[in-house]
Image (spheres, rainbow, N blue to C red):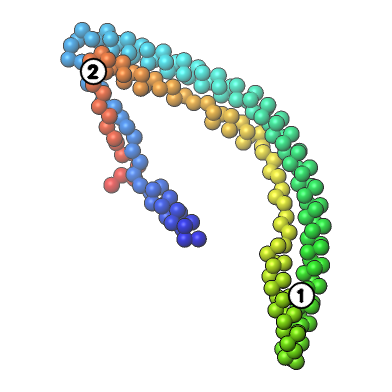
Amino acid sequence: MYRFLSVLILFLLTGCGPRYVIHNQYIPPASSAMQGCLTNCTIVRQSCQDRCQRDYQFCLEDAFGRAKVAEREALRDYDMALMRYNTEFLHYQHALHSWERDYYDFSRDYNHFALKCEKEKDGYACKKRDELKSYLKRLNRDRPREPRVPMRVSFDQILADQQRLCSNDCGCDTGYDHCYVGCGGQVIPHKICVENCD
C-alpha cells in the first residue's frame, strides 16, 4: 500500500511539473555563397516530409485492412479462450461445491467442539477445536478461485492499435539540421517551457 501511494504521489508531482519543448535557432553561415547549399537542405527536407506524409497516410489507410486481419485472429483467440473458460468454470463450480460442503461440515464440527470445550473444559474437545480452527483457516486460504472471463476486443480498439503503429516522424528535421550545419550554419537548441511554467 505504501509503495502504491509513493508511486501515485510521484506520478502526480511529475504530472504537474513544467513541460518543455525544444526549438532550434538557425544561424546562417557567414558566407552568402552557401545560400544554394541551404536551399538544397530545404528542398531535401520538404521532399522527406512529403514522402513521410504519403507513407503515413498510406499506413493509416492500410491500418483498416490490417485491423480486419487482426480482428479475425482476435476472434479466433477469443473463441478458444471462451471454450477454455467454460471448461474451467465447470471445474470451478464442481470444486466450489465440494469446498462449500467441506467448509460447512468442518464449521459444524468446529462449533460443536468449541462449545464442548468452553462448557465442559474437555481437553480432547479443545484439542479438536484448535485442529479444526487451523484446518478452516487453511480451507479459507485454498478456496477455489473463479476463472477470469475472457474479454472480447472491439474492432475500434484493434483499429486504434494498428493506427498507432503509423508514424509521421521520419527524422526529416534532424536530417535538415545536419545538412544546415554541413553548409556552415549553426543550429542552437533552446529548451522552452510550454506548460505549468513558474
Q: Residue at x 80, y 53 (%)?
A: 91
Task: Please provide percent x and percent y for residue 166.
Answer: 52, 26
Looking at the image, which residue is at 27% across and 7% down?
36
User: What is the crowding at mark 2: few (fewer than 14 residues within 10 Å), some, or many (at least 20)?
Assistant: some
Q: Is residue 65 left or right of residue 89?
A: left
Disc 2 vs disc 1: which is toward the camera?
A: 1
Viewer-proximal residue among 112 and 9: 112
Q: Nearer the viewer, residue 22 or 120?
A: 120
Which numbered tag is attached to residue 107?
A: 1
Q: Which residue is mark 2?
A: 185
Between the C-alphas of marks 2 and 1, the distance is: 85 Å
Compared to 131, does 15 lie above or below? above
Residue lying furthest bottom: 120
Contact (Cβ within 8 Å) of mark 2 with mark 1:
no
Position of residue 44 measured from the top left corner of the image (x, y, whole percent): 37, 12
- SS at mark 2 in the image: loop
Height in image: 39 above or below 94? above
Q: Give the vertical position of 106 relative to 91 (above or below).
A: below
Find residue 156 and report its image quarter: top right
Of residues 198 and 7, the one drawn nearer to the viewer in this rendering: 7
Mark 1 surroundings: few (<14), some (14-19) or many (≥20) residues within 10 A: some
